[in-house]
Image (cartoon, rainbow, N blue to C red):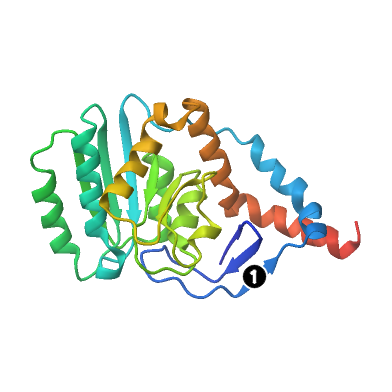
């Protein structure tokens, strides 16, 4: 089970595994009224005290994607977008990790090998399907800077929520419930039918502090806002606030 705060409410879902597989439908959505939002605001304000890390360090960036390797997930577009970025920005060393198996895994591995063979500033790995705990280890211990999703069909993507719970900005298209998660406070929301060039420019916008206006402070802000999806914090705070509401406090 997972819990996160969306723009207009609180989503409680029944997901037990990582987002390598299709998300189940949420079992409960609580829409926040102004009074309920005001009551909960002290708990959410606590998140702003967390200390985020700067985004890109010493010209290196780690990009992660997490999905089934099927046509609808458009992982091939991620390959093409990363190739475009690595070609344009030879000063940035990119590491890309894709989490998830599926029928197109071998084809995508071959496509990545062919696309990146001429570049010396990008490396990649396909992990196959992983348990949720291992996915969390990648986000926490291998220092992930950006999460990218270019799927053509989504509900409310648990893969994005998982990444955001570790303070990772997300790049994703405006489809399904993605708009409830991704905006200019938590990453870059692409158009519904985003192509390779749009995705590449979004990656550059997040990678390059010079394009983010406020430099390092902008990356810190993105990470701080993304941490609102951390269930380790939200579970206890949410239960405390519900108890306070029920008690009339």
In the rendered image, the quadrant that contains the C terminus is bottom right
Q: With 219 as the anchor, is 2 left or right in this view?
A: right
Identify the residue at horizontal 21%, vertical 43% (top origin).
Answer: 84
Q: Is residue 194 above or below residue 177?
A: above
Q: With 161 as the anchor, is 228 left or right in this view?
A: right
Q: Position of residue 236 (x, y in %)?
A: 69, 54
Q: Quadrant of residue 185?
A: top right
Q: Residue furthest right?
A: 248
Q: Position of residue 93 (x, y in %)?
A: 25, 32
Depth check: 239 or 76 in front? 76
In the rendered image, the quadrant that contains the N terminus is bottom right
Identify the residue at horizontal 58%, vertical 32% (top origin).
Answer: 51
Q: Is residue 7 above or below residue 215?
A: below
Q: Position of residue 90 (x, y in %)?
A: 20, 30
* Residue assigned mark 1: 29
Q: Quadrant of residue 238?
A: bottom right
Depth check: 90 or 242 in front? 90
Identify the residue at horizontal 70%, vertical 66% (top origin).
Answer: 31
Q: Quadrant of residue 119?
A: top left
Q: Is residue 12 above or below residue 7?
A: below
Q: Position of residue 164 (x, y in %)?
A: 49, 49
Q: With 39 as the anchor, is 24 left or right in this view?
A: left
Q: Secondary structure at mark 1?
A: strand
Depth check: 51 or 84 in front? 84
Q: How many numbered marks appear?
A: 1
Identify the residue at horizontal 22%, vertical 34% (top origin).
Answer: 88
């Amino acid at each position: 089970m997972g819990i996160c705060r969306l723009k207009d409410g609180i989503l409680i879902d029944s997901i037990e595994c990582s987002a390598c597989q299709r998300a189940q439908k949420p079992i409960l959505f609580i829409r926040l009224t102004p009074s309920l939002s005001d009551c909960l605001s002290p708990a959410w304000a606590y998140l702003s005290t967390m200390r985020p890390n700067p985004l890109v360090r010493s010209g290196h960036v780690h990009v992660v994607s997490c999905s089934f390797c099927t046509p609808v997930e458009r992982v091939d577009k991620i390959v093409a977008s990363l190739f475009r970025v690595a070609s344009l920005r030879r000063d940035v060393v990119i590491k890309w990790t894709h989490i998830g198996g599926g029928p197109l895994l071998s084809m995508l591995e071959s496509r990545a090998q062919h696309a990146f063979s001429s570049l010396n500033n990008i490396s990649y790995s396909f992990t196959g399907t992983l348990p949720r705990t291992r996915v969390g280890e990648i986000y926490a211990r291998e220092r992930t800077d950006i999460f990218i999703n270019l799927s053509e069909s989504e509900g409310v993507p648990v893969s994005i929520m998982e990444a955001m719970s570790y303070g990772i900005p997300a790049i994703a298209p405006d489809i399904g419930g993605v708009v409830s998660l991704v905006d200019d406070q938590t990453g870059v929301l692409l158009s519904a039918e985003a192509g390779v060039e749009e995705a590449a420019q979004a990656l550059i916008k997040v990678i390059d502090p010079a394009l983010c206006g406020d430099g390092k402070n902008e990356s810190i802000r993105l990470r701080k806002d993304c941490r609102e999806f951390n269930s380790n914090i939200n579970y206890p705070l949410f239960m405390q606030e519900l108890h306070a509401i029920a008690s009339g406090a």
